[in-house]
Structures are given as structure tokens and as C-alpha cells.
Image (cartoon, rainbow, N blue to C red):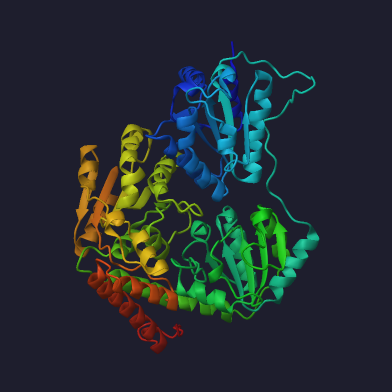
Amino acid sequence: MATVSDFVIQRVTEWGVTRVFGFPGDGAGAFDGALGKAEKEGTGLEYIRPTHEEICGLMATAHAKFTGETGVCIATSSPGAFHLLNGLYDAQMDNQPVVAIVGQQGLNALGTFTMQESNLERVFADVAVYVQTIVSPEQAQAVVDTAFRTARLRLGPAVIVIPHDVQAMKMVEPSPANWVSRSSAVGASTAITPPESEIVKMAGIINAGQKVTFLVGHGATGATAEVLEAARLAGAGIITALRGKQVVPSDVPHHTQQLGLLGSLPSLKQMKHCDTLVLLGTNYPYGQFLPESGQARAVQVDLKPEQMGLRYPTELNVWGDVKATLEALIPHLDAKTDLSWQNGIADEMVSWEKEMAAQAALEYSDGVNPRRVIHELNKRLPPRAIVTADAGTTADWYGHHIRLRDGMLGDMSGRLATMLAAMPYAVAAKFAYPDRTVVCTIGDGAFQMLGMNELITVKKYLSRWSNPQLVIVVMHNDDLGQVSWEMRTEDGNPVWRTAQDVESVDYAGWAELLGFEAVRVRADDEVEAALDRAFAHRGVTLIDAYCSKNVPPLPAHITAEFAKNTALALLKGDPYLLEVAKDSAEALLSEGIERVKGTLHLGQGDGATER
């Protein structure tokens, strides 16, 4: 006898899902039992059980990001369901289709304040694009189909709540009756092309521009060829948002990488001087780095209409899929003959890369230069590698030094900017692409949160991966570095060690305890050998890099407020005053030398331009 749970599992597979991330519990007991029965019969889903429900949510979001499929996570009633929230907010804020299936106490318990009975529809109302409780077998089909269809169309998480007794009810075929909906497991197309009249307007704006810049986000994934061709015709420079890094290969000379605090100076200069801005699949949130109002004519293309015209006063908002829209646009674009704007951008990027190399070469008295670790890591990334990062200072080094070449993938928690995601993302990437090398770059604070425990998950599932190579680079500085620098630069406060200190742990020893390779790096001259060893090993390697905590994550442009707040923080008794002052001075000096060399054309050939 097929139950509601049996039906839901079958329907999930009809939506193209083959893998789910779950954690069992009594509130989902009947559903868990049905999952086990389906696995035994060979008709079920691959069920991945990490060490915590929060990781289930983050892994489902990462799966959606890396594959373009709908991610699915499963948990029990209120305690487990609550733990999913952080991962679901990650999906909501980064526009990813995820479906969460959560248990609930029996129907008769609803509203009676019994153990583990809570109003889950109210709990998930803020995060979900759709949340509904299945209260009868006749309703199950419509709720499951609507959840998947809505998640894919509205690009966010949907939640299906199934009370325990409903999970075990006999499934019935919905009949043509009043109040009964009969639905299909068919998604709606998202390859939306705007009307021809909008395409013509968009082409007119771009064709009229002399200094065109494309700002490309993760929403342009799958449209790399179209972005490059449109930029070629428009003579445009290209900037990628941090989560759009993988869309445009790093060897495109007029791709200046990221913008903002962890962006490049060529990107900032594009924004200050462009006369036309084209936003492609991005909800870039930092308006202070965008052009002055009225400076540039702007067009935005996105599938999320509520997020258009929100960061910059755009002249034209085009509701459409980036790939389909650019395919329609390209025949209307005039090929620029004057490529001085684009070529100048490429020249500036050459100078910037020299500056990044100079920053990575600096040595600090209190530990390894974290920039050197990531800079050298980047040189060794194999073809088709996947790189993840947390949202601490590691994200700065990721933005400044990681260059994703064609075929590589890279991602992190974006607008939610959670430190927790790097390791769950890396493990999810290994499940999605078991033949590819995955690299997780993570700070020690983030590694203590959701990294150390996920090494247990790696140990559990390692044999499933055809290529077991997974490299975890832990930036070990015993400090919540990003927050420490934010305290200084944003609020003018000294570091508060009571809150900021991270208890030092032998991370390499923990990896060795689990049977993995581990390398301790305590000096700059050990970095290259450690990375060579890691990439030579066909398995899991953890690099425990004892890094300086005082290396400043310098933005491309030091504002007066940034400098003033940092100085105030140091003068108020920052415990690392001398180290921070010295290391910041060395970093700034290195930056200045490279820019002077650029001005004087020293060692850069005839293509150098003033920085």
C-alpha cells in the first residue's frame, strides 16, 4: 500500500531530484521510514546525512548553486526544522531554488501546545516563497508540485510540512472533485525573452555608449558565451560580482574581477568613468561603489523584477533570462571600432595583478602572509577545480587572488554572507561533481563552527567519490579576523579580545585523527611545498596555515573614513596596535610602489597606464 510518504518521494524524483540532504527525527519518522524502504528497493533518493540540519540546508543551497537543479533538504519537526533556517535564508538571499520537507506532530496536536508542536507555517513565512502543510492525501500532489514549481520560478526556498500521521496515510489519486486540485510535475520555462521593443531600446542605450561596463552576477550563469560576445561588440569592460566570478573566465583581459572592499582598482575606475552600465543577473548590494547618479545610462536584466532598478537609477529594466535576452540583443549591437576604453581597462588589470603579487610576497613577523597562501593556491588549481570560501577575511583573499579559469566553479554565501557555508558548500560540490578537485578556503573561526564536524561527513562518504581529492586550507590566526577589521574600519573601535579571540586548535591533528593527510605551515617559505604536497595527494588534505592576524584586507581605494576609523581604533588601545600599524604600513608601501612603477612604466612594457 502506497502512503503519502511514498508518493512524495516518487514525486520528488519526477521533479528530477536524485539527491537530498537530510537528518532524521521522530516528527518525520514515517517519512524517514519510507525513504529507507525506497533505498532498499533501489527506487529512492540518494540520502546524504551530514552532522546537523543547518548543514543540510546549506548543502541543499550549494547543490542548487553548483548544478542549477533544485536543492532538497529534509528534517524533523520543530527542533530540526528550526535548524534549517540559516540554509534556507542563504537560498532566499542568493535566489536559489530549494525545497525543504519537514515533519510535524499529528493533525490533532496542531494548536494544542504539545511537545515539539509549533506553527511551522508561521516560522517559515518570512524565508519561503511558498509554505504549506499537507493535511490530506488528496492535497499532497498539488502541494509538492506547487512547492517545486514556485521555488524554480521565484528563485527561492519552498517548504512542505507533513504531519506525522499524514505521512503514513494511504495515498489516493486526486479525483475531479470540488476543492481537489490535480497538478503536474512539470516546471515552467524560465528562458524568458523580453519583447522586441525592449531589446531595441536596450541595444540603443548600449550602442550610444562610449565607455560601457558590464556588471555580471551569478544570474548570468550559463550565459558566458553571450556575455563575452556582447562585451566584444560593445567594447565593454567586464566586472563580476563575487558570486558571478565563475561566469567570466579570468583570462579575459578586460575582466577586472570584483568591485568594492574586496575588489580591484580597475573595477572601481570603471565605475567612476563609465557612461553606460549594464547589470546582468546581479543584485549587487553596495551602492557606494556604483557610479554617481546621472553619470551613466543604465540597463538591468534579471528574472527577479522586484530587485531591478533598486541599486542604481536604471533607465531600462528588462525582465528576462540573461542568456535568452543577450541572444536576442546581440544581432542589434553595433561593433565598436574604437576599443580604447576596453584596452585601457585590460592594461590597468595587468598593473593590478602585479600589485596583488607584490602584496602576496610581503612577509609578516607574526605568521604566514594569508595572501601568499591563496595566491600560490591559485597557481596550482587544476582544470575544472571548484573553490569555496567563507565570508571572513578569506573572502577578501578569494576575491583578490583566486582567478577562476574556463570550466572552473567557485561560490560562497553571498548576501547572507555567513561564515558557516564554506565547508558545507565544498562537501556538496564533491557530491555534485565527484570527479573534480574541490578546494575549501576557510578561516579558523568558520572551521570551528561548521568545518571540523563536516570532516566527519567527508570521512563517512569519501568512498563514493571517484576522485577523492579535497583540499581544505584553514587560515589559522586565532582571531575572528573580518569582524576585528570591521570593528576598526567601520566603527573606530579597538579589537575586543574577549569576543574576538578564537581558541587555538590543532586542526592538522584533527584531520590526522580522522585518517586524512595534514600539513602544518608556519613560515612563508613552506607555503609552496605544502600546496604541492596537497595537490599531489589523491585524497583529503588539510593545510593548517598559521597566518598573521594583522594583514589588512585593504580595499582598492582607501577612503578618508576608512583611514580615520582605523587610526581611532588603534589610538583607543587596540591590543595589536604595533603589529597592525607595521603590517598596514608595509602593505600600503607595497601598494604604493607598484602604482608608482605603473606610472613610470617600470618593468611593464609599453602597455602600462597610470594607476
The answer to whether residue 609 is above or below residue 422 is below
Identify the image quadrant of the C terminus.
bottom left
Residue drawn at x 67%, y 37% as measured from the top left: 187
Residue 146's x, y, as percent?
A: 67, 33
Can see residue 471? Answer: no
Residue 27's x, y, as percent?
A: 49, 23
The answer to whether residue 160 is above or below residue 30 is below
Compare residues 211 and 168 and report the one nearer the observer. Answer: 168
Residue drawn at x 30%, y 52% as measured from the top left: 444
The answer to whether residue 323 is above or below residue 49 is below
Can see residue 590? Answer: yes
Name the side, left or right, on which 184 lies relative to 603.
Answer: right
Name the side, left or right, on which 228 lies relative to 401.
Answer: right
Name the side, left or right, on which 568 lies relative to 201.
Answer: left
Residue 300's x, y, as percent?
A: 66, 62
**Quadrant in the picture for residue 600:** bottom left
